[in-house]
Amino acid sequence: MDKAKPLLNVENLGISFGGLRAVQGVDLQLFSKEMVGLIGPNGAGKTTFFNMLTGVYEPTEGTIMLGNRKLNGLSPYKITQGGISRTFQNIRLFGELSVIDNVKVAYHSQAKHSLLSSIIRLPQHFNGEREMEEKALAFLEIFQLQRFKDEKAKNLPYGQQRRLEIARALAASPKLLLLDEPAAGMNPQETKELMNLIALIRETFELTVLLIEHDMPLVMGVCERIYVLDHGQLIAQGTPTEIKNNPKVIEAYLGEEVS
Amino acid sequence: MAFLKKVGFFWGGIVVSLVIFAVVQFLLSNGTLDLFYENTLVYMAINIILAVSLHLIIGITGQFSIGHAGFLAVGAYASAIITMKLELPFPLALLVGGIVAALAGFVIGFPSLRLRGDYLAIATLGFGEIVRIAFLNVDYVGGASGMMVEHFTTWPWVFGCMLVTILVILNFTRSTHGRACISIREDETAADAMGINTTYYKVLAFMIGAFFAGVAGGLFAHNFYIIQPSNFGFLKSFDILIFVVLGGLGSLSGAVISAILLTVISAFLQDYPETRMIIYSLVLIIVMLYRPRGLMGTKEITSLFSRKKKSKGGAKDGQSETVA
Amino acid sequence: MEYVQQLVNGISVGSIYALIALGYTMVYGIVKLINFAHGDVFMVGSFVGFYSITVLHLPFVAALLVSMVVCAIFGMLIERIAYKPLRNATRIAALITAIGVSLLIEYGFIYVRGAQLEAYPRDVLPDFKINLFGAEIESQAILILGVSIALMILLQFIVHKTKMGKSMRAVSYDAEAAQLMGINVNRTISYTFAIGSALAGAAGVIFGVYYTKIEPLMGIIPGLKAFVAAVLGGIGILPGAMVGGLLLGVIESFVSAIGFSLWRDGAAFIVLILILVFMPSGLFGKNRREKV
């Protein structure tokens, strides 16, 4: 793909909550198949930025373009169908649904069988459901979750819940995947597995990833470029080495751990 | 294998219910079951329709609606107008009752887009009251003194409608569309983020639920010779709510079982309405204190059987038993 | 001067709604529960007042106080027995329990004493007419308003000037933090129920004196309307409940005045749905976002 034309182009993006400007003037470009990190101290506005990209919040200024499509003001489900999918900082699985059903929900918007065919059980329904089942199973296999497939999602161990949430986000077949602190609450072993998983995802699905993370070795290890957000504004961007040595970034992180 | 099992349950259920129907029909026609039993059975089937239709809205989609009697009222009056004022046939009246109630469901579905939890509950309660007060004020349907309705509701009709209601809602729930609704119940924000059009499914759940409540209204109206706005107050809504809550939020068979049990209890306590309400309210409080997810939780009665089967066949699959 | 009269009527009814609404709003503010049984506390208060006047031959003010004390204890008992075990349950479970408690009080009451009506004696308060801008105003309407306003001022004083009031505000703002600061959350919740229920009891007595007829299911409709008033003003906000109650009373009076008296009861619910859909945080509330 043409490097000059970004997949995601965010210009001058900002949002205010009742006079408080949580994020302002953010410019960010993601190119196809890139892996980019978004870091910053707590409360810098990273999750708010994600929420604007996914339509949970409507930005009060600036534009978000995915390819040639403007995303401002679209509802979250339309943005997801348009090609952006996400995970959440505090895991949000469908707890009472089984593991495989969680993945199937993400396939829903690609389902070919209509409401009527399901209600009167036409062959179309059975074919559609079987196709979903097969696709979802294949997915669980990639993530090594197939042995949990009939377990309720809420009963999975924490690390597996994180995996499932990523699997579910990918099942929505996005062009751009947003991961909100996927390593939060994981031990070093689990974090290492997660890094391998993310590498695997990139190879298998060939997509663009934007990653919010506090775990610096993880971000520095997997990302090609990094953006740094502080007090709602971008203060730096560049390769991991550039970011590591940027005095502004070090200053922003003073008082927090720098590694 | 799993497919066969599903089909087995499906046809098994159909056969069992047809046998029940035939036995009851036989006992009714040769007079073994008298009018008291016939009335109780008809009322039971109507209550099952109401319980299952509300189960779709509350138990599956997670939209806490406590104005279900409003849909019942709309269906009852709409169908009574069809048979009594326009003198059209009863089956058409049932259908129209359902459709008009579904339109009301469409209207009340909209507040559900903005409101959650207890706020939505209060709004739906308000809707139910507005409907009741509206019928109280329309002279065309008799105002407070009510409307005379002919008796058309028979055991085959209520049984047929009940079976269709259960099948449609079961089929809906066990499809990608039903999963979409459950995902809204579980976490609306995440459902939205997974590409589910939450607006569409919430309104759809209200419309399907209201449709069947409207059909129940048609059956109800043509069973009692007279309908009055006071039949459809919020005590009626609470009655229906109790079926769903007691049975287990999210369990269709739970809703059916509790509708059956409570109809039987009410039938024997119909001369002691206060005692009945005291029992109802105590049951409600005790269930909430000790089993807040209802008697069945989200489980279905069939899962009791499939559990056993699974443990038998477990050795073959090997892995299915390793789950912690 | 039909409209002045309607306005006065509306304010009188509205002040009763406001007194009940205060209890709803205080309880919601502190435990996030729509206390459905609140309307029934109002009913119990009305009956306690009735028996105090007819059986114990107490004067109006004494009957009012007896009713407030009995209701305060009753409210605390309801909270202790039914709601406290559900503090950590889902809000829906708590709401269903509240509905259950409400039905239990209503039908338990009927079971014990029967469903028959009672009539408050006419001579509890002096009854004469005052001429104001050409409108005939009953002296009772003015007394009702006076009592309601006095109670509301007393409540403001309690909430803003006493230690218990401060704890109530702290718990409603953040129960966990309040607990860490050494506030006894359970006791604060009990007091909140007590104060709210006492106000409902007072409203019950006032209602009895004004409308004379009382019966065991009388609490349902005023209870629901008072809830509407609380939502209208912004739930959890005390001045909101007062303004919401008065406003709702006036709206209802005008709906009857322009010839839709049968729609009177519907007006409240139409207001409710409009407010919930277009201004869910009410007239005085602030918008809150869900954190994602």
Image (cartoon, helix red, strand yellow):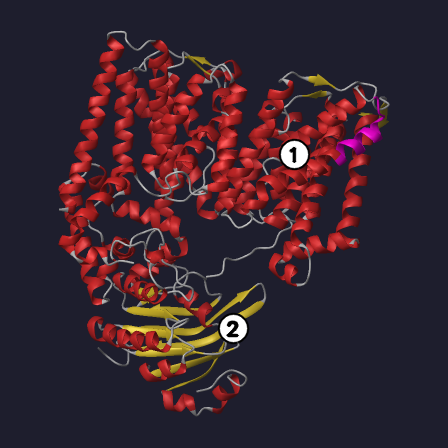
Asked if the residue under mark 1 is in contact with the one under mark 2, i.e. CB atoms within 8 Å, the reply is no
- Inspect the magenta stretch and tell me whether residue B181 lies in it: no
**Which residue is found at the position 40% from the left and 11% from the top?**
B225
Q: Could you say where residue B181 lies in the image, as x and y percent from the top left?
A: 34, 46
Q: Could you say where residue B280 lies in the image, as x and y percent from the top left?
A: 49, 28
Q: Is residue B72 above or below residue B2?
A: above
Three-letter residue code for mark 1: Ile
Where, by quadrant of the figure, is residue A135 drawn?
Answer: bottom left
Q: CA distance from mark 2 to mark 1?
A: 46 Å
Specify whether residue B294 is in view: yes
- Inspect the magenta stretch and tell me whether residue C60 lies in it: yes
Q: Could you say where residue A31 lies in the image, as x and y percent from the top left?
A: 29, 77
Q: Is residue C45 left or right of residue A196?
A: right
Q: Which mark is residue C251?
A: 1
Specify the subunit that label 1 lies on.
Answer: C
Report which residue position mark 2 lands on. A43
Residue C46 or residue B97, whichever sits in front: C46
Q: Is residue A159 left or right of residue C292?
A: left
The C terminus of chain A sits in image quarter: bottom left
Residue segment shown in magenta: C57-69
Dot 1 surroundings within 10 Å: few (below 14), some, or many (20 or more)? Answer: many
